[in-house]
Amino acid sequence: MFLHLGGATVISLNEIIAVINLEKLSLEEEWITRSLAEKQVLNISDGEPKSAIFTDQKIIFSPISSLTLKKRLKQVSGKVSCSLA
């Protein structure tokens, strides 16, 4: 199953490690800064991104809020198997 992240971007549910709400989180936090330096970053947001989706290989900045992504996960999978921050 796949999750639509905005624009023409979809991702397999199996790839998702975490979905982080960027509206309530500072990008200066150490673990995010380290992750940004270590992984490929894909920004699909035209303006300010609202959420970050972490996978093994990359971080995707999405214009869609983490709450909306959580609702989509419930619709697609029938349950939310990952914790959304």
Image: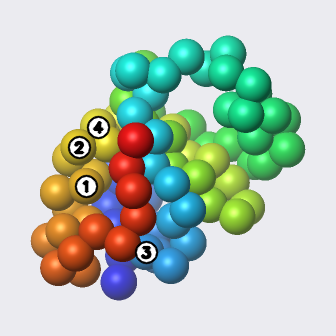
Q: Which mark is residue 5?
A: none
Judge the density around disc 1: few (<14), some (14-19), many (≥20) Cα neighbours within 10 Å.
some
Which of these two is toward me, 83 or 21? Answer: 83
Q: Position of residue 44 (x, y in %)?
A: 48, 41
Report whether 8 appears left or right of 65: right
Dot 3 corresponds to which residue? 13
Report whether 51 appears left or right of 42: left
Q: CA distance from mark 3 to mark 4?
A: 17 Å
Report whether 76 appears left or right of 3: left
Query: Are circles 4 and 2 on residues that touch, CB within 8 Å?
Result: yes
Q: Give the SS element for disc 3.
A: helix
Q: Position of residue 7 (x, y in %)?
A: 35, 49
As drawn, 15 above or below 39: below
**Would residue 77 be visible to someone looking at this image?**
yes
Residue drawn at 67 percent across, 21 percent down: 29
Amino acid at circle 4: Ser
Dot 4 corresponds to which residue? 65
